[in-house]
Image: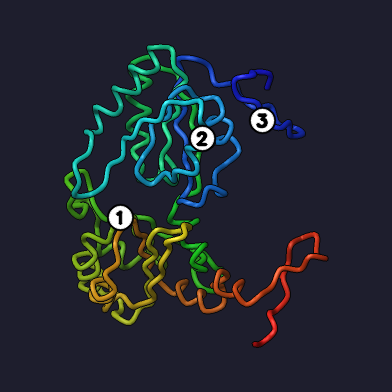
Amino acid sequence: MSDSHSPLPALPGTNWPTFQPGWVWLAGAGPGDPGLLTLHALNALRQADVIVYDALVQKAILEWAPQAEHIYAGKRGGKPSAKQRDISLHLVELARAGKRVLRLKGGDPFVFGRGGEEGQTLVQHGVPIRIIPGISAGIGGLAYAGIPVTHRDVNQSVTFVTGHDQTGDTPSSLNWKAIADGAQVLVIYMGMKHVDRIANALLDAGRDPMEPAAVVTSATTEDQNVLETTLGTMAADIAAANLKPPSILCIGRSVLMRQALDWQSIAQGFEPRNDDPLGRGRPAEAS
């Protein structure tokens, strides 16, 4: 890429796309940890004139684009926020003004992120777009908690659902009976507000109250918290622990894999090896 507006180190076999004026790139910023940003998203950050970002985008990521104007467009449940239609039309206005517009969204823009709605509006108004996928919190956030969403000894499918619809209520279009019957592992985005109602719907549909469950808040960040519980006690345990969103809920036997794969806790028992080029550790000596 020769555009001096946003130089990136040359990588073999990669032709970095140039961010043209009047375009909007819809990019996922990942679940929180800036290191989980994709290289295409970093390329976009380096070139953007304007970044319209969501509430879950970490400030450290925005610092990689000091040349750009930063416009907050976060939407958090129960708090005043811009209407989705207004956000989409603002993107159109910025693009028509000749700006390189980066719409930066937490996780992946097409996974419960309204990226599809914004993309439709832009296309309808003749604005060219590019989609840059991101690591979704339902996968990356659980991985940071040591919970694999699939494991061939445990499950062969995973079901992703949202905990609320456009009205802010639990989605009326979801068939909780079918989900309870068919979801080996269930991952719920934005479900904390209605966790009691969701859990009761699953229990009423026949799920085992002793089924393993986990709640991961502020996934992949310094404030990450993981609560291991059961479906039957999840709502009460969340209230007792005073957990706050953003959160990911996981229900199913894959939660038990955390007993072996809680890699962040395991890593605390290792010391870095200066002689190891791969950065592997060795067990810390007992004090």
Mark identifier at residue 8: 3
Q: Kindly identify the amino acid type of the residue bearing the numbered disc 3.
A: Leu
Q: Residue at x 47, y 60 (%)?
A: 222
Q: Is residue 240 left or right of residue 141?
A: left
Horizontal side, residue 136 vs residue 211: left or right: right
Sequence-first tag of 3 and 2: 3
Q: Position of residue 50 (x, y in %)?
A: 43, 25
- Is residue 280 left or right of 26 when viewed as pictured? right
Element type where label 2 sits in the image: strand
Q: Position of residue 267 (x, y in %)?
A: 61, 71
Q: Residues within 10 Å of mark 2 (few under 14, many from 20)?
A: many
Q: CA distance from mark 3 to mark 2?
A: 17 Å
Q: What residue would you read off at disc 1?
A: 190
Q: Residue at x 27, y 61 (%)?
A: 192
Q: What residue do we see at 29% from left, 74% from top?
A: 241
Q: Residue furthest bottom?
A: 287
229 w.r.t. 24: above or below? below
Closer to the N terminus: mark 2 or mark 1? 2
Q: Residue furthest right?
A: 275
Three-letter code, disc 2: Ile
Q: Of the numbered discs in the image, which one, if any, rests on residue 132?
A: 2
